Image (cartoon, rainbow, N blue to C red):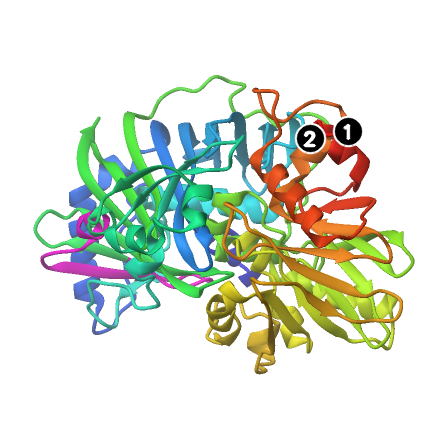
Amino acid sequence: MSRRNLRTTFSIGMLSLLAVFQSGTGLAMSAGPDQPALSAAMEKALKGIGGRAALESLNTLHIEDFRERYAMGQGPEPGVGHFRMTRTEAVASYDIGNDQFRLDFRHTNHYERSREVTELVIGQSGYLIGLDDFYLQREPGVRVMRSDRWAVAKKSERLLNPHFLLQDLLNKPSLASIAEETQLETTGPRITEDKVFPVTFVRDRPTGKRNVIANDNWVKRWQDEEFYELSINELEVDNGWLKRWRDTVALTGAHHQIEIQDDVHPITLHINEQTGRIDKLSTMEHDMVYGDAPLEVTYTDWQRHDGLYFPSHIRISLAGVPYLEVTRSKVTVNPTFDANAFAKPDGVKYVHSIELAMRGASVSQLVRSFTSAGSPEKALGRPRIDSQELAEGVYLLEGTPSDAVFTLAVELENGVAVIEPGSFDLKGEAIVEWLAENIPGKPVSHIIVSHHHSDHSGGVRPYVAAGASAVVHEAAIEFYEDLLARTNSTIMPDALDRNPVEANIITVSALGPLLIDDEKRPITIYPVVSGHTTDMVIVGLEKQEILYSADLYIGAMARLLRARVNMTLTGEAAQSALELDAAIDATGATFKVLVGSHDREPVSYADFKTYLGNE
């Protein structure tokens, strides 16, 4: 098999779902000092999962479960706060022998809005059926998966089913070795408890307020502040929330450790020496904010189903904090599927990209959280940049594939100011290139970030690598110092990893605006008091009468506004819109056009006032 095919079949972070067995396949491990230990560990794992024969005969599988997905980077204050992104009812159908699977999801987001989507993977192709949009801004339909999503789907289901990994090792024993060091915990950065609380579970759409779990320290810090009243709807104090998770996923006792080759990072199976169960899988992935971080999957409450054992409870941690919790309600071994269960949709054609798949496998948990990877499609690995000129020297930029954030570029006399980097580094690299081609001779002088949420701030590093000063709210200075100082990524190095420079950070005071002076296009950055985050700013181009705002004026609101539909069911404007209205009034400036970070079409200020019911 060629190296190209080997990478496609067994690697790029997911070790292909297909495991083609031949009768009597054995454990003919390559000779070496670790061969006896490796053979013993494999035999233990096979026995613990139900035996070699039962595993080799596993050809189809049906699983029903409930999934709760979390993510960092969406808290109310910079660098602090965990978030439950979605709750999902899932039905997974795996046709292992034919290298295909189907995932039928019903996702409910933090606003209690639900959507249904089917992910269909057939060999080296993938399709999306239904409403595949975290931001609920598309119509339901049928689309091809990007290759990053294909890789994410493959890898994610393999993390949940170590049976597939063992099948691959039976088919390709040379992928396995004994881990060089025996360790119970994966090395790498871990997020500390003081960064995790508060944990947001629900956000109320009209008010934007959060239902959270917090610890005593966070409550004491914020309970008497205006921000607490603006941000918190319901509070539960639970100092042990994170500790209970970490106690549950901690390994105890003696374990065999089998290391599996992987192009993203080696995967280690921790096999209980007493039970033969795979208690944990550990590897590494990349996060745009935290860099390379340990990814750990723990398997508990194993139950026997038709001769094979399956974990009923699975937990995935990234950097030591919860990212996914799965509770299984039904497992059926070797079912017969309907003939049309894996039928390719008509009218769409999948084109596979190895580079894109590799990138998706490197950030699988991040993509699973947001479903918008902003990953590359071209050989150079950067998205295409499309633009619309809102005024002379003012451009609204969009990356394809999209990270659902729209960036504003403003030509200055001696440089270019960029507003809102978005979530991914490659979009930033592509925009820097676009600016060099379309506004030649002027370097990127400023990168202005509306607030710290990872879908807005995660792509800031390429601009700093290009020489830009980062302009952020003073409340976020420590967050950006940490984000811009890290240079340790080996899984997915970005422009700042390749060209480390000391970041110049300019802060916007909470007491008043910051001016970037320019003869033609001066830019004013205004701090905003908001329950969304403590570090919110809006950006005004007074001479062009254009205002750029982020989540206070989201794309969904703009769409409903244009349709003359109020966003809330109460007939009242959302609190975030009221906060934006107050912030605009406080500027004393006149703005005729509003640009939202999540919407490609600006709207008029007059329409915004109509939405508010003021005019």
Residue at image point 66% right, 24% down: 566
Quadrant for residue 236, please give it.
top left
What residue is shown with label 2? 612
**Residue 126 location (% of width, % of height):** 58, 38
The kind of residue on which mark 2 rests is: Leu
**Residue 334 location (% of width, % of height):** 33, 26
Rate crowding at label 1 as few (under 14), some (14 to 19) or many (20 or more) other CA atoms within 10 Å. few
Stretch in magenta: 244-268
Query: Vertically, is 217 above or below 37?
Result: above
What residue is shown with label 1? 615
Q: Is residue 505 left or right of residue 447?
A: left
**How far apart are the two marked residues, 1 and 2, measured between alpha carbons?**
8 Å
**Residue 410 location (% of width, % of height):** 81, 63
The kind of residue on which mark 1 rests is: Glu
Residue 263 inside the magenta-drawn segment: yes
Q: Is residue 611 left or right of residue 95?
A: right
Kind of element beneath mark 1: loop
The answer to whether residue 20 shows anywhere in this view is: no
**Residue 277 location (% of width, % of height):** 17, 46
Q: Quadrant of the C terminus?
A: top right
Q: Which label is found at residue 108?
A: none
Quadrant for residue 125, please give it.
top right
Asked if the residue under mark 2 is in contact with the one under mark 1, i.e. CB atoms within 8 Å, the reply is: yes
Query: Vertically, is 334 above or below 533?
Result: above
Kind of element beneath mark 2: helix
All told, the count of numbered labels is 2
Towards the viewer: 4 or 566: 566
